[in-house]
Structure formats: C-alpha cells, structure tokens
Amino acid sequence: MDWNKLLSDKRLRNTTRSQSNLDQRNEFESDFGRIIFSPALRRMHDKTQVFPLINDDNTHTRLTHSLEVATLAKSLGINLCANPKFTERINHRDKDKLVRIIPEILSSISLCHDIGNPPFGHFGEEVIAKYFEGYFNNMKITKGIEVVTKDQEGDFTKFNGNAQGFRVLTRQQILQDKFGLNLTFGTLSSFLKYPNLSTEIVQNGYRRKLGVYQSEKEILNKIREETGLINVRHPLAFLMEAADTISYQLMDIEDGFNRGLYRINDIYDFVEKNGNKSVVELFMNMREKEYNRLDLFNKDRTAIVKFRIHLIQIQINHALTKFLENLDRIESGEYMDELVYDDEKGGIAETLYSFIKDRIFTHREIQSLELTGCSVIRGLFGHFVPEIIERPKDERTKRLWSMISQSLRWLVELETGKKELHSIDNYYKLRIIVDFVSGMTDKFALSLYQKLEGIKIN
C-alpha cells in the first residue's frame, strides 16, 4: 500500500475552501469541521445506543457514544504517530505532519461512524432489511413485478447503517451539488468499514456486509482509483472499529449499571466464571485495587468509573499493539479480525460482550422498546412504500411525498434529473424513502407514525 495515496487530501470536487493566513487547518481538519456542523450529526442526539425512547439524560445516545469513540480513536492515532517504526515504515511525504493527519482522520470517521444508523439502533437495521425482503417477495408472487433490479435489491434487503452513512456523507448534506460534505478521499476511504457493494459481499471477514449502495458506486470507484484500495479495507478503519468496540462495550456496561440492572460485583463474578485465566487474574486484581479498597461513600459508582478507565487503557494498548504486529497482513487484505479480540478464547472483549448479551440485551425493558421500534419502522414503510411505488399519482401519495424533506427531494432530482414523482424510477423512489426514514430520530419516527395511524393529531 502507498500511504501517500491512502492519506490523500484530494476531494470529489475541487475545494473552494480558502486557505488564508487566518485558516491554517489542513484538509483533514476541515473534514472534521464539516462533519461537526452537519445536521445529520446533530440528529444523533435522539437516536438509540442501547436503551430506546428514554428520558434519562445520563444514558448514552448515538451522539455521546460517537463523541467518546472519536476521543479513543484520536488517542490511538496520536500514539501510532509517536511510534518511529510506523512512521518510518509508511514513508509518508509529510512525516512530520502525520500527527495532524492520522489522528484527525480517525476522529472524523469515528465521529460519524454511526451517522447512517436508522431509529432504534441496530435492531432498526434488521427491521428495514426484513421489511424489504418481504415486500419484494410479495410483489413478485402476487403481481409478478420486479420492483428493482437484482443488483439494486441488495441495497434494501441487506440494509446497513454503514452504507447509509456513506450516502449521508457523500450525497445528502447538499447545498447546490450532489457531493454532500465533499470530504477528502483519505477520510472517505477510512470510513468504509465494509468496502464493497452488495454484489461484492463474501461470507467472511470485513466484506460480509453491505458498505456502499449502487447509487454511490461511481464514488466508490473514484476512491478506489485514488487510493489503490480494491475490496481491501483502509488500515485506519481497523483502529476506528477498535475504538468503537471498546467504547460501546464499556459504556453499555456503565449504562446498564446506572439503570440498576446489576451491581459492580455482578460483573466481576461473571468474568471470574467466563474469562480465561489471564483475564480472571486481571479482573480479580482490579476488584482488589479498584473496589475493595474504596471507602464506603459512593463506592459502587466510583468503582464502575474506575473499572471503565482502567479497561479503556488496557484495550487501547492492546489494539495498537495488534495493529502494528499485523500491519503487513492488514495491508495485504489477509487480516480479517477485530483488533480488540484475543486469539485465545475468553479474552477481555469476548467476555465483556458475553456479559452485555446476558445482562443487558435480554432485559425486558429493551426488548419491549425494540418491539415498539419494529412496529414504528414497519408502519412508516407500510405507509410510504406501497403508495409511492404502486400509486404515484394518487392524491394521498402526493401528500406523503410532500412530507419528505425538501433537501432529499432536491437530491433525487440532482441524481436522476427527474422532478415529478411518477417519472422517477423505483430504485430512487425507494432510495429517498429509506433516506427519509433512516434519518429520523427515534421520537420523530414515533410521532410521525402515530400521526399517520391517526393515533394523535399534533
């Protein structure tokens, strides 16, 4: 791999940004600013991390989670750039400026790594994919109609928030063109956790999921041409993934603790039963130093914070070490694992994830609210999809169409050259519906669903 190409500061459209004496930011620092000020990022403040539709300000949302991931990723980037073996190895033309490039890219892609997630978290992704599987099959069986081409079907039946996020960044935040935020190739290529179209999915590794829609195929090809990455993940995407896993595991555990689902000793007891020998030893030492020796005042609350701080540092160091050890395999496309997971069974990340599945995901409150989210998302698609696809000239359809945000309708006009709903092909009709619904906050989705169902008026 050529790291000079991997860290390309070129853009889809030549930038009109003025680099005056008053603005000394590089292009990657400009990317961060573009993402920070985007409406899509703001909407993440009311999107589910784990606990949907709650009014507890102390529990993480997608936005607070993403801010923490960006912080951890930046730490990884700074530590990486301080490693002389790495900086010598990649032979970058601006070696002395790497600390203002790599940490900034990692901050940016981590900040927006969930920007395409629909309402109600990852469960919402499954609901969308299953809805379209059912809709397409029903149209084939009952009406003999192929709604979209086979290649296009995968964009909906394999819906993934990462592919939607790529569309948000490269298309949606428009002014008067269809280049979205017009981020650098270095940032965009690093963002691609799954660097492939639905037609390029394979069964294992980081190509197992959809990463780019057919509507953004041209942009993917430009990124591949500029960076030289063909179906190979950008190395920095591994570090973003590590920061994400570290953050969501530890903060999900802290959220569950704060909501009273368990006590700190329950975590230690679980690890003692399920972790491998070295992990059990580590956690028992933590229990002695970070819990048993604390004063009684606010003991459990203090202990869970110390628990999080201590494990973040351990896992950050572990991820960076594995990245450097496996860099040759990462660059060749042979390395497919997550950096935070150990080769030995029962490691820290594996054990913590087992605890989350056992004590959080199965909790009645979460499952009940996920069912609510399922009804809301399916209900919204049930109103918009059949009407817009099958009855585009009906009066009710026109009213539904007018409810979709003007900016999304402008985008489809830019992409297709068509303004009237009945003249737009089915793929882009579905594309705009998915853009609209997936961009909603949890509470807006619930409110709109209730209005369309006649449950409430205002």
Image (cartoon, rainbow, N blue to C red):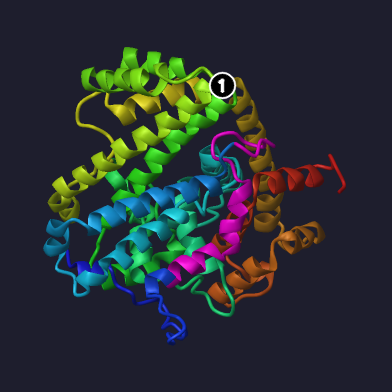
Q: Is residue 159 among what the camera can see?
A: no
Whether residue 198 is situated above or below residue 248 in the rendered picture: below
With 45 as the anchor, is 91 left or right in this view? left
For the question of whether residue 115 can be seen, the reply is yes
**Considering only vertical position in the picture, is 34 above or below 66?**
below
Q: Name the residue nearer the viewer: 212 or 108.
A: 108
Which x, y percent locates residue 175? 59, 76
Q: Which residue is mark 1?
A: 363
| Residue 166, percent from left and from top | 45, 60
What's the residue type where badge 1 is placed?
Answer: His
Quarter of the rendering occupied by the N terminus: bottom left
Residue at 53% from the left image edge and 63% from the top image edge: 36
State the extent of the magenta-drawn residues as a range.
30-58
Viewer-proximal residue among 118 and 218: 118
- How many numbered circles are shown? 1
Say whether residue 46 is magenta: yes
Helix, strand or loop status at disc 1: loop
Report if residue 141 lies within the magenta region.
no
Q: Based on the displayed image, in which of its 4 quarters is residue 294 positioned?
A: top left
Quick check: 256 above or below 458? above
